């Protein structure tokens, strides 16, 4: 079950990164930088929050 949860997390999160990229590329260069910084900050927040979830499928810490 853990492997399935981990797979689903990747399957559902990857399109968010792609959407951020597509949105950024359609904007002017100044807005591209702003959108990129915002997306990176959101990703960092998600990674930090996921450290506190009990299931190992959602945990972003390295195994070991």
Image (tube, rainbow, N blue to C red):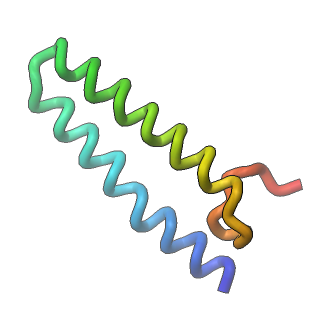
Q: Residue at x 74, y 50 (%)?
A: 61
How far across and how far down the image is residue 42, in percent? 43, 39
Return the residue found at the far bottom: 1
How far across and how far down the image is residue 8, in percent? 49, 73
Q: How many marks?
A: 0
Q: Please tell me in which quadrant of the rendered image residue 59 appears.
A: bottom right
- Up-down relation of residue 1 to residue 46 (above or below): below
- Up-down relation of residue 26 to residue 52 (above or below): above
Return the residue found at the far right: 64
Q: Residue at x 11, y 26 (%)?
A: 27
Q: Please tell me in which quadrant of the rendered image residue 56 appears.
A: bottom right
Instruction: For the N terminus, give its image quadrant.
Output: bottom right
Return the residue found at the far top: 30
- Up-down relation of residue 17 to residue 29 (above or below): below
Query: In this image, 31 relative to 9: left or right?
Result: left
Query: In this image, 6 relative to 64: left or right?
Result: left
Q: Residue at x 40, y 66 (%)?
A: 12
Q: Residue at x 54, y 72 (%)?
A: 7
How far across and how far down the image is residue 57, in percent? 66, 69
Query: In this image, 61 relative to 35: left or right?
Result: right
């Amino acid at each position: 079950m853990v492997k399935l949860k981990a797979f689903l997390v990747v399957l559902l999160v990857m399109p968010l990164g792609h959407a951020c990229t597509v949105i950024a590329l359609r904007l002017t260069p100044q807005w591209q930088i702003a959108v990129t910084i915002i997306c990176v900050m959101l990703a960092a927040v998600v990674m930090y929050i996921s450290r506190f979830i009990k299931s190992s499928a959602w945990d972003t810490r390295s195994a070991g």
